[in-house]
Image (cartoon, rainbow, N blue to C red):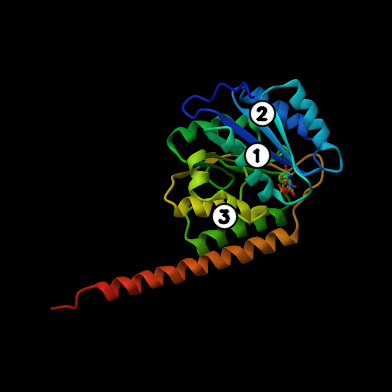
Amino acid sequence: MSAGEGYPGVGRVLVVIPTYNEAENVRIIVDRVRAAVPQVDVLIADDNSPDGTGDIADGLAADDPQVHVLHRPGKQGLGAAYVHGFGWAAERDYDAVVEMDADGSHAPEELPKLLDRLTDADVVLGSRYVRGGKVINWPVNRLLLSRGGNIYVRVVLGMSVKDATGGYRAYRMPVLSKIDIESVASQGYCFQVDLAWRAHRAGFRLVEVPITFAERERGASKMSSNIVREALWRVTVWGATDRVNAVKRRLRGRRNQPPAA
Ligand SMILES: Nc1nc2c(ncn2[C@@H]2O[C@H](COP(=O)(O)OP(=O)(O)OP(=O)(O)O)[C@@H](O)[C@H]2O)c(=O)[nH]1
Ligand SMILES: [Mg+2]
């Protein structure tokens, strides 16, 4: 079992890192996390990467009792890997989980900033789009897609989060059980919006802290047009459902009001 003694004010923390073909990155990211915040444990959730990422991860775990590996049967998307990893954390009584990409876009050196805010929040979102947040080395089309997507999410869902698609986050464990994480089917970017939206609707306290997001330097992106289409479609459906429910509630309230004297 892990040796992590816990982060002050938060408790036992598991950093879940999903990987698919990240052989060039996995050792670097794990080393950076362990050096930046020695109290936290790491779980690599690998989807049987053909490039041998899982074997490298096994080597890291063999050398360090705070590093663990979840071998999954095949590529099933980022969302499924996180749901599996969070279940693994719940079974082992962690107090909080962190989402982090393997490609170096999320700097482990910024993790203390996220965990420090978790002492008075339920969910902490690493945010590129609050004051002090930055994006480094992204082509203009990628930045426009991300900013546009976040504006769409804000307008359609009416949620005041500035960066709902970002994937550098910390959650207290009770949030995940309350929002029924096992039932989340969204993948890609949509997985991030889905979790923020569920936590927001359940009344949890979400806070954003500025992060510097850097484009990956090694390995290939798994971003695709399907991921964008999925997000657009699901967010639109959630927003429409929410509006319809609000109207129904208003009508029900009016019906239950006593007639004017
Ligand atoms: N286990 C697992 N991990 C995945 C899967 N798809 C992506 N990942 C991982 O999720 C993280 C984010 O994926 P990226 O390819 O960097 O996608 P992105 O950050 O949206 O795109 P870029 O900004 O272009 O890199 C990385 O650590 C990937 O290895 C998957 O199907 N299964
Ligand atoms: Mg990336």
Disc 3 crowd, CA 10 A, few/some/many (<14, 14-19, 20+): many
Q: Mark 2 belongs to which amino acid?
A: Val
Looking at the figure, which quarter contains the C terminus? bottom left
Numbered circle sitting on residue 194: 3
In the image, taking residue 91 as reference, residue 257 lies left or right, namely: left
The residue tagged with tag 2: helix, strand or loop?
A: helix
Corner quadrant of residue 20:
top right
Q: Residue furthest right?
A: 51
Mark 2 or 3, which is nearer the eye?
3
Above or below, 225 relative to 259? above
Numbered circle sitting on residue 33: 2
Label 1 CB less than 8 angstroms from ligand 1: yes
Label 2 CB less than 8 angstroms from ligand 1: no
Structural distance between the alpha carbons of marks 2 and 3: 26 Å
Q: Residue at x 80, y 26 (%)?
A: 59
Question: Mark 1 highlights which residue?
Answer: 100
Q: Where is residue 196 in the image (x, y as percent from the top left)?
A: 53, 51
Q: Do the residues labelled 2 and 1 touch (CB within 8 Å)?
A: yes
Q: Earlier in the sequence, mark 2 or mark 3?
A: 2
Q: Closer to the camera, 261 or 83? A: 83
Structural distance between the alpha carbons of marks 2 and 1: 10 Å
